[in-house]
Structures are given as structure tokens and as C-alpha cells.
Image (cartoon, helix red, strand yellow):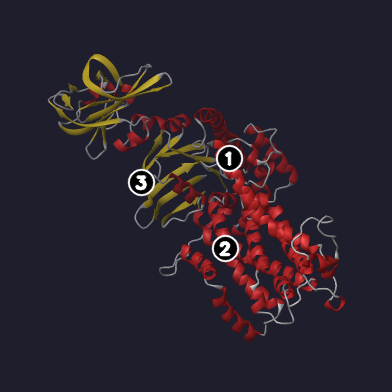
Amino acid sequence: MTLIASNLSIKSEKNYHLNDVSFTMSKGEIYTIIGRTLAGKTTLLKTIAGLISPDSGGLAFDGHDFGSIPVWKREIAMVYQQFINYPHLTVYQNVAFPLKQRGIQKTEIHRRVKAALSQVGLGGFGDRKIQALSGGQQQRVALARSLVKEAKIVLLDEPLVNLDYKLREQLREEFRGIFDTKASEDSILIYSSTDPVEAMQLGGQILVMDEGRILQQASAKEIYENPISAKVSQITNDPAMNLFDGRIEDGCIVLSPEIKFNLPSHFNGLPQGDFTFGLRAAAISLDDNGFPFSVELSEISGSETFLHVRHEGLKIVGLLNLVQNFPVGGKVSIRFDTKHLYAFARDGRLKSSPYGGLQ
Amino acid sequence: MSLFYSTLKYLVVTLWSIFVIAPFLWALTTSFKDFQSVTNGATYIPWVDFEPTLDGWRSLFKSPAQGGVAIVEPFFNSVIVTAAGSGISIILGTLAAYSLSRFTFRVGPIRNGDITFFFISQRIMPPVVLSIPFFIMLGKLGLLDTLFGLILVYVVLLMPIAVWIMVDFFNKVPIEIDETALIDGCNPYQAFFKVVLPNSVPGIIVAGMFCMIFGWTDFFFAFILTFTEVQLLPVAIVALNSSITPWWSLSAAALVSVAPLVVVAFIVERYLSKGNLSGALK
């Protein structure tokens, strides 16, 4: 059972919402579409659902043309980022709604609704009105409604984005278990997110989208280790990977007249010339023998500190494993962990990664 | 300072309340007076200022031959015309508004917003401008001085109100609700009737109330388009104001004409202040 998209394109007057999107998805897998806002994630999910018709290209599911099947006859379920439920129905009635539409017997509906509600942790909430639930509970109802259908394709459009941080963390953990179960039930689970951490945590296959295009489709590990372009590296890292222009010259990397360092061994095959170098925030550290930078901003986040520093035109963000307030404008010495340095061509294509990607 | 503003606030509210309630109080007391009490000047306290009588109220249910004022038939005519006009307007207006809210219409330079404005624009025109074509058209169709003719005119007059209110309401209903219904197995008609419509009840009630108010209180078209066969309540009440005005009957009739709107307003009051979509999209 596969879902195959071939050259899907949707264009408005000025922009592409989807631009020549092709992919193959198989049952039993979780696929995470990651991209920034307006990257085309929701458009792609709605196209799969049949809510939007592509201008060109097509979708095939299980060998059949998906385009000719109306939304209400497709074996799909969808959870939106807004907590979409039917306000005039109780929690039980909400979850039972898709089953009633299918004309399933009452006893079977009762069994499945109870199972779905208990799966999402809403066992005793059947008689409640939707308005009486918290945001997290409302999203659980929406998830239960999508699970109860036992759909072949489950679409989850940033389902946690509107929840507060704590609840998001909690539900992410809980949902992951549910998704794994669901995926193992011969479903294709497609999850969209703007959050790289979420995408990496869910594992499975990742599709990186930007401006309506799929930039890369690979496993979470592969995307992390070998992002195909500078754009992918930025989208899939939080904070975004630091990118800075420089040159390889006489066995050195030259970022500015003052900032030069030796070529790391994994760059040995690269020719001399101009490159865009990439380094994750975690590979930046404080070191008395480092390069002089001035502090632009420091943000404490839990047990870590995001340090925004600048040296002339070179701006970088470091993720320091300490909790410390740095005065704005103060001087710090920064070390680059060149073992983790990426090299991209000036047009953004990956040239070399610390994990052996390309050369 | 705050005491001053607080006092001022209460003073303004009190004055406004008096301003609003005074006519009702006047009508209420007058409806319990007889000829003698009315001609004695302005008096308000029964049993103290005047001896109350039910003659005014009894006259509503008597024929003119029995000394009554015959407003029972006009009352039910008004009920029929208002209910039918409002009902049809709400049904057609809700369907039109849903289409305008959810589907994109393009005819040359005309877009959804323009079509919505076309609906509303005919309410901008003074009634007298509309009355002439209405009179001619109903005359040609043989529908002058008929309930059906009035209902048709009221549908034309009330539907823009329904469309205007319901377009705004549907625009606030997240389209994702419709989409979720489709995904959950509803075809577009089922999605509308099973999901969108039940969640639009507050909007429909508000639109219905406005239609009823406009329909029930209309005097102009009811006066222009009817003669002898059909009479609506506002026209019948005004007709009482003749050379010898029975103020007690007129007051009772006026209160009867206001009563349905007061009842409706109390019933739907809670829908005017809040919607019912808080669980759809938090």
C-alpha cells in the first residue's frame, strides 16, 4: 500500500503553493513534513485529503488514481493545528461522528469510540461538551476522532503547535506512542511541523519543504547528518544552523582577516575557493584562546544559554551548556568546533559534511 | 472624581431608562382608562389617580359593530406575513450567505464582496423609491392587497438583512469545520446540514429576530400595498387614530403589537451577546 505523488503543482496568481512535488510513502511509516510557515505543508496535506485539487500532477493510492475519489470517500483522517471539533456535539458524539457517517453498527461504534477515547486519555469524558474541555483535551478529541476511523492515511497538521510548551511536550510523548501503534496498523501517518526537534523526535522519514518544493526526503538521521543544502540545514535545526561565507585558502578556512582556522580533515577533498560554511549552535563554545566577538543578545533557556554574537559582518548563535547572563556589547572569545563544520557551495548545495556526505 | 463619574453614569442611565420606559408606562396606564379618565389629563397611578377598567382591552376582541376595534385579524395577518417573510428570508438568506462565505464567485470584475453588497444595497434606497416598482409589479401580478403579495415584498426586503448577518457569521465559522465534516464522510450537503447549520443556530436566531423586527414594525409597505381586503397590525392601529380616538383601545392595541417582539427579544437575548463556536476553534 503506497501513496505516490507525481509532480503536484498548485499555483496562485503570483506564487507556487506546491511546486512539482513528488514522493512515495509506504504503509507502516511515519512521515514528517517539516518546513517554515507558508512552505506548503498544509496545502500538501489538504491536497492529499482531496480538499484542494492540484493544477497539475496526480496522486495515486494503492495503485488507484486518488484524484477521482471525493474527499468523503477517501480513507483518510486529519487533525488540524486549530482544535477542530463539532461544538454542538458531546465528546462521545464527536468521536462517533465519522463512524455514524459510515453506517457502522451501534455496538461497534460504542466499542471503537470507547477504545479511542481511552487511547487518548479521555476515558471518562464522553458526556462532556467540547466547550467544557481545555485546549489539550480538545485536541485529544480531534485525535481520537481521527484514530477511530482506522483510516489508511492519517494527516496531522501541526497538531501541537497551539498548545503551551509543557502540554506540547507531554502530548508529544503520548502521541508518539499512539502514532507508532497507528503506523504499525498498516496506516500511513503524515505529520507536519515547523519544529525541527519535534520532527527529529518522531523519527521516521522526513520531507523538508520550502516555497512549495520538497527539498529533501530522507530519514531523520540522514537529514541531520547530511542536509542536502544550506536551506535544509537551516529548516531542520533549531536554532538554525549558523551559515557564514568564507574561503578555503592554503589549507585554511578564512572567514575574515582575523578569523582563520585550519581545514578540518573531512574537508581535505575540497578545492580552494569560496564556500558557505555551516556550524550548528551546539558546536560553538567559549574558549579563552578563541576569536573575539561582541555579545548582541543572550537568552537563557532552561539549563542552556543562547548566545548571539557578532564580529564585523559575521553573526553567529551559540548554544552554551550553561546558565549565564552576558552583558550586551561585552566581549567573549568564541571557538568553532571545526570537526562539525559543513561546507556548502555558494548556491547552497552541500559539498562536505562531518558525516561523510559528498565531497 | 470616580464618584462624580459614577453618579453621572447612573444619572444618564436613569434618564435614558425613563425616556425609553415612559411611552410604555403611558400606554399601559392609558389602556386601563376610560373616556373620563383620559380626558382628565395625565394621570399614572391606578386606583389613586383614576379607576382602572378593562374596557380598552375588551374592545380588542370585539367587532366594530359591538364597539370594538377589530385588530384580531390584522394581528394574525401580521403574524402570517412576518413569519412567512422572515422564514423564507432566513432559509434563502442562509443558503446565499453560506455560498458567498465559502465559494468564490467571479463574473468579470464582480467578486463575492460585490454580490454581498448588491444584496444589502437595496436596503440603502429609501422605501418610497422601492414602493413604486413594487406597486406596479404586484398590480400586474394581481397580488396587490393580498397576504401572498406582502410576503413576497417582505422576502425582498428582509433577505438582505439575513444575508448580511449570516455572511458575517459564516465568515467567522472556521472553514476547517466544513472540511473536517467532509473528511469524516459527509458529502457537501450533509456537511452543511449536519455540521454547519447546527452550529449556526445563534446567527440564524439573530438574523431571524432582526427580520421579524423589520417585518413586524413595517408600516410603509403594509400601508401602500394593501387597501381593504388585507390589513396589517401597524396600519390597523394607526387607523384607530381618527377624529374620535379611543385612546384606551389604541394603547392596548399598541402594547399587543409590541408584546411579540418583547417576548422574542427575551428568548434570544443570550444569543445576541455570545456565539456558540467556542469549542470549534479555540
CA distance separating discs 2 and 1 = 41 Å
Q: Is residue B100 left or right of residue B201?
A: left
Image coords of residue B165 (percent x, y)? 57, 59
For the C terminus of chain B, which image quadrant? top right
Q: Chain of mark 3?
A: A
Q: Is residue A284 above or below residue B228?
A: above
Q: Which residue is mark 3?
A: A211
At label 2, counting other C-alpha atoms closer than 10 Å, the crowd grade (few under 14, some 14-19, many 20 or more) is: many
Q: Nearer the viewer, mark 2 or mark 3?
A: 2
Name the secondary structure under disc 3. loop
Q: Pointer 1: what residue?
A: B6
The spot of residue B97 in percent (x, y) is 56, 61
Do discs 1 and 3 belong to a common subunit?
A: no
For the residue marked with disc 2, what is the amino acid? Answer: Val
> Hey, what amino acid is under mark 3?
Glu
Instruction: Please give the residue where the numbered disc 2 appears in the rendered image.
Output: B163
Q: Nearer the viewer, mark 1 or mark 3?
A: 1
Name the residue at 61% across, 52% down: B185
Please tell me whether residue A113 is drawn above or below residue B246 in the rendered image: above
A45 left or right of B196 in image: left
List x then y, in percent, for residue B184: 61, 49
Q: Nearer the viewer, mark 2 or mark 1?
A: 1
Q: Marks 2 and 3, how far apart in space?
A: 38 Å
